[in-house]
Image (cartoon, helix red, strand yellow):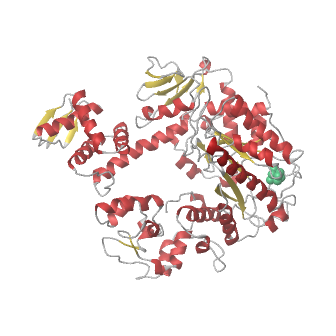
């Protein structure tokens, strides 16, 4: 094996690491005779980096050479960094070697743009093709679609990949153009549409040929960088909402800006990436997808930014005391989800458990409701004592923000 | 207080339930055959494990509860936690006595406890699926050692058999001294008589395949390279990756 492999791997993993998505969920595929691998629908993390992120896929770049010059990117052409490129064979061997040792669920491959978008895309697709056809690899494959790549190549990519992604990177087009002069929203939305079309056409074909391979069965995802430009959370979350309205858009990721290029005047000087804000955006994203919230309920022109010291659900509840208290023994599921301290899991458990008798505070605790928050917003078997009405939103806010949010203890924990 | 002695096998436990209904006395404690009885013991019974009786209990359970609940009972059993058998006993008894399913009555302590114990096993099962690391040996077998708190090997083997359908592998529980070997056609239980083969959970170097060390170095290098230094968070890291699993993780080995 090539002795440069170690340093190549190092360079190309380092250049890929800022892409936050590492999900391997969304597809369940059984093994095939003579093939290797399967995918488990729930997604598996095989390790965690020292920054606490899940390692599920071999997240790597085919090459970090790039003809573009995006201000927020380490790999931009004007940077003086170590460059490298894998051959198709090297990447295939690495993926299979890691997979067989249970290090990974599969491959997440992206690339800098070399020569032109199609040339690059053709090589990305080549790796996936080789894995799927020659090696009959059934593990997970996530391919980045290169902005500007032709429809034909995107369609071929979708036949091998479980997920495709195109990063929007910046929520507003004005700022995207400022930081990435070679890009605009069109160059992002076009490939997203190719992916949608591919999915639709494939679904049609599969009606008559159900054995046909599914096109990008785990759909598409995208990523926005937070805090490199001056967008408000209102602007960001409206872009999110617009993206989720697209068929097949499964996840929008948020990536707190890490100052990789410190000498660029277009970029802010940050001492530390905006991790708390990033966390709040993920929570708001969760409210949109699983809690039945509309984006305008979370942010609007009057409240353009998420509060940093409160989670967005609590923040909404304090702005809407008229919605409370909720009676946990009678309220429907949608209303239970609105209670701060009640997550999807506990809402489900409440609905099941209350059939056996009225629930009291002790039961709610056992079920996993965070009573510290919920107590101000509910009535149960016992009479409510100090809801947000008997006290006041200000009182509850003071009680619940006594401790300053500590970014080092942050964790993406959504059952709140 | 009434005490039953039994052999701490799952069939024995089911037989104990059968006996209890037959005798119309229900034990407060379940003990091993030679375990000393507590003071104030008003009655004892020694269960003789009987496949026919246990089968009948399981069958009647199958009629009454869904697959999920049956799984939960097996998971709770495999937890090997002290007292888990008594919880299972009471849970099955309540199920048999109740006209409708008690599975979601979480206000009942036994229902809640059974679920919590089963969850512990299930969580470790999940972790093992994530953290098992295979080392390729010179005879092309992929080998992984584990030492789980709960007896999860029977629960994870299907996952690996399906995933690595084309590769020979062994997953070995060092704590319970047994393993499962898959030769690509079938899985068989096995155990080593000598422990000469490994050193602290890893296969000894001279038994490894030629490029095994290279792959391990590549993985370690990769693991280091994808860490974002600006975001380092040791507490979160340890929470997701508890220290007691580190010795199996190639990436946590010093280079
Ligand atoms: S095109 Fe991609 S790799 Fe190239 S500079 Fe822009 S973000 Fe970086």
Where is residue A187? Give x, y as percent. 81, 57
The residue depicted at 28 percent of the width and 53 percent of the height is B109
Q: Relative to A136, does residue B124 appear above or below in the rendering?
A: below
The residue depicted at 45 percent of the width and 19 percent of the height is B192
Q: Is residue B105 left or right of residue A245?
A: left
Where is residue A82? Give x, y as percent. 84, 43
Q: Is residue A56 left or right of residue A376?
A: right
Where is residue B230? Give x, y as percent. 69, 54
Quadrant of the rendering where the N terminus of chain A is positioned: top right
The residue depicted at 35 percent of the width and 77 percent of the height is A385
Q: Relative to A221, does residue B123 appear above or below in the rendering?
A: above
Residue that protrudes farthest toward the left in the picture: B42
Q: Count up the numbered dots.
A: 0
The residue depicted at 43 percent of the width and 25 percent of the height is B178
Where is residue A345? Give x, y as percent. 45, 58
- Identify the image quadrant of residue A224: bottom right
């Amino acid at each position: 094996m090539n002795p440069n492999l170690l340093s190549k791997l190092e360079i190309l993993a380092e250049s890929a690491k800022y892409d936050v998505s590492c999900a391997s969920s969304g597809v369940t595929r059984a093994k095939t005779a003579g093939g290797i691998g399967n995918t488990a629908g729930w997604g598996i993390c095989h390790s965690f980096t020292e920054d606490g992120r899940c390692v599920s896929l071999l997240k790597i770049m085919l090459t970090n050479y790039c003809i573009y010059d995006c201000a927020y990117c380490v790999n931009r052409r004007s940077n003086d960094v170590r460059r490298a490129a894998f051959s198709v064979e090297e990447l295939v061997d690495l993926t299979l070697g890691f997979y067989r040792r249970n290090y990974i669920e599969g491959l997440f491959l992206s690339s800098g743009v070399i020569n032109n978008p199609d040339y690059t895309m053709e090589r990305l697709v080549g790796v996936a093709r080789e894995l799927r056809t020659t090696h009959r690899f059934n593990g997970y494959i996530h391919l980045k679609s290169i902005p500007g790549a032709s429809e034909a190549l995107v369609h071929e990519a979708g036949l091998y990949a479980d997920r495709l992604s195109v990063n929007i990177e910046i929520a507003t087009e004005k700022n995207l153009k400022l930081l990435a002069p070679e890009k605009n929203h069109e160059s992002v939305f076009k490939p997203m549409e190719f992916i949608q079309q591919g999915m639709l056409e494939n679904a049609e074909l599969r009606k008559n040929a159900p054995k046909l391979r599914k096109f990008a069965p785990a759909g598409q995802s995208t990523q926005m960088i937070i805090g490199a430009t001056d967008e408000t959370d209102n602007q960001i979350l409206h872009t999110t909402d617009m993206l989720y309205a697209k068929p097949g858009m499964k996840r929008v990721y948020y990536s707190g800006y890490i100052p990789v290029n410190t000498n660029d005047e277009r970029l802010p000087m940050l001492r530390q990436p905006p991790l708390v804000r990033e966390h709040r955006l993920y929570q708001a994203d969760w409210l949109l997808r699983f809690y039945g919230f509309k984006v305008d309920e979370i942010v609007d022109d009057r409240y353009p930014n998420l509060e940093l010291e409160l989670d967005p659900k609590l923040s909404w509840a304090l702005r809407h005391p008229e919605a409370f208290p909720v009676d946990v023994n009678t309220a429907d599921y949608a209303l239970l989800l609105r209670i701060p301290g009640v997550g999807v899991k506990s809402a489900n458990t409440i609905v099941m458990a209350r059939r056996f008798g009225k629930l009291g505070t002790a039961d709610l605790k056992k079920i996993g409701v965070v009573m510290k928050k919920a107590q101000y917003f509910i009535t149960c078997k016992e009479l409510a004592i100090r809801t947000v009405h008997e006290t006041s939103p200000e009182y509850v806010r003071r009680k619940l923000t006594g401790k300053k949010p500590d970014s080092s203890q942050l964790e993406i924990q959504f059952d709140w | 207080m009434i005490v039953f002695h039994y052999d701490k096998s799952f069939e024995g436990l089911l037989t104990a339930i059968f006996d209890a209904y037959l005798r119309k006395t229900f034990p407060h404690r379940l003990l091993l055959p030679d375990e000393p009885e507590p003071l104030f013991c008003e009655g004892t019974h020694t269960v003789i494990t009987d496949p026919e009786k246990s089968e009948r209990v399981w069958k009647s359970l199958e009629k009454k509860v869904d697959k999920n609940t049956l799984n939960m009972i097996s998971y709770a059993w495999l937890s090997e936690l002290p007292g888990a058998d008594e919880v299972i006993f009471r849970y099955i008894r309540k199920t048999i006595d109740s006209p409708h399913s008690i599975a979601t009555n979480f206000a009942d302590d036994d229902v809640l406890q059974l679920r919590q114990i089963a969850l512990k096993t299930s969580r470790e099962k999940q972790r093992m699926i994530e953290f098992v690391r295979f080392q390729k040996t010179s005879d092309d077998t992929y080998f992984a050692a584990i030492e789980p708190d709960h007896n999860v090997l029977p629960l994870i083997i299907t996952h690996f058999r399906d995933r690595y359908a084309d590769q020979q592998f062994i997953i070995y529980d060092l704590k319970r001294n047994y393993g499962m070997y898959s030769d690509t056609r079938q899985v068989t239980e096995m155990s080593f008589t000598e422990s000469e083969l490994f050193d602290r959970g890893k296969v000894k170097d001279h038994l490894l395949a030629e490029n095994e060390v290279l792959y391990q170095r590549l993985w370690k290098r990769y693991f280091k390279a994808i860490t974002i230094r600006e975001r380092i968070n040791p507490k979160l890291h340890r929470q997701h990756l508890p220290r007691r699993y580190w010795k199996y993780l190639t990436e946590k080995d010093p280079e």
